[in-house]
Amino acid sequence: MNKIAPILLFATAISFSTGCKDRKDQPAAVPTENTEKEASANFSSLLSGVLANAELPQNISLKIQESIATDSAFIQAVNIILQEDPFLWMLIDKKHALPENYEPSDLVKLAKGSYRVGRDGLFLRSAAAASLEEMAAAAKSEKLTLTVSSTYRTYVYQVNVYNRKVKAAGQQAADRVSARPGHSQHQLGLTIDFGSITNAFAQTTEGRWLAANASRFGWSLSYPQGYEEITGYSWESWHYRYTGKELAKFIDTYFEGIQQYALRFLHEWKQANCSTSTSTPPPPQASQI
Ligand SMILES: [Zn+2]
């Protein structure tokens, strides 16, 4: 197979994968040898920029470059993910926040399912709730019951929690364990804290089962052990984000299971290909929970 072919495929797929309106209507050029070389050079430089800005470790960058040169699986995965709900792959961390008033429009209250709820009044977005039920049913078939302790948190709730932690332990200590308002994955309505919300959870049967199986159902551990410098948070063996199955597989296949690396890559990729658009999602629809 022509070595440039996958690169060209990726380059021509950009406009569709990112939803950049200004590129979408451009007519497809008939490739000549020169345009192929140009496209290849442009793409290589774009990819290098994305990998550098995403601050990926060298081994992961090399793996991605090799994957792209070998076949189109990586390209296809990126295309599928970027066409999904942007909140599934949105980078929310110490530097990237949700809009202050963001509230998902499809929150559902967790009712009795194959899982146990730690308290009444827990909400998730509908796709995450459905996936949780699927995962919990699988756990149950292995005689395990998952306990859901915390889910969606409003912006106002985060303000109160953060201020309380700063008051008790100071800002530096608070930042290690608690997100600043607007920077919590819990505001997405796609995130669950399981079990005890302590790292004793990692040694429980439920904790071990989730570590081994969650990604099959589209869930990803956000703050793994040994990655505090990368994620900005202490290890949280109980905190899982619903990313959808495609992205969960993508994280495992190309990013060594580290969600933060994959989300940074997608964020930078989107930025590089849509210089006119921003990472801010369209204004959300308000809803009552
Ligand atoms: Zn959490």
Image (cartoon, grey):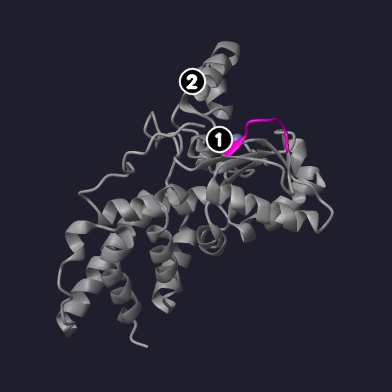
- The x, y position of residue 165, in whole percent, is 57, 17
Q: Which residue is mark 1?
A: 152
The question of residue 203 being in magenta is answered with no
Quarter holding the N terminus? bottom left
SS of the residue under disc 2: helix
Nearer to the camera, 222 or 195? 195
> Mark 2 sits on what residue?
159
Compute the Cα span from label 1 to label 2: 14 Å
For residue 9, which quarter of the picture? bottom left
Q: Earlier in the sequence, mark 1 or mark 2?
A: 1
Q: Classify residue 216 as left or right of residue 34.
A: right
| Mark 2 close to ligand 1, CB under 8 Å | no
- Whether residue 254 can be seen here: yes
Residue occupying the point 42% across, 65% down: 80
Magenta residues: mostly which secondary structure? loop
Q: x, y (%) of residue 174?
A: 55, 22
Q: Is residue 156 above or below residue 80?
A: above
Q: Please give the name of the residue rendered at 54% of the width and 47% of the height, measured from the top-left corner.
A: 126
Kind of residue sitting beneath label 1: Tyr
- Report if residue 55 is visible in the image: no
> Which amino acid, by three-letter code, is at mark 2?
Val
Disc 1 under 8 Å from ligand 1? The reply is: no
Span shown in magenta: 117-123
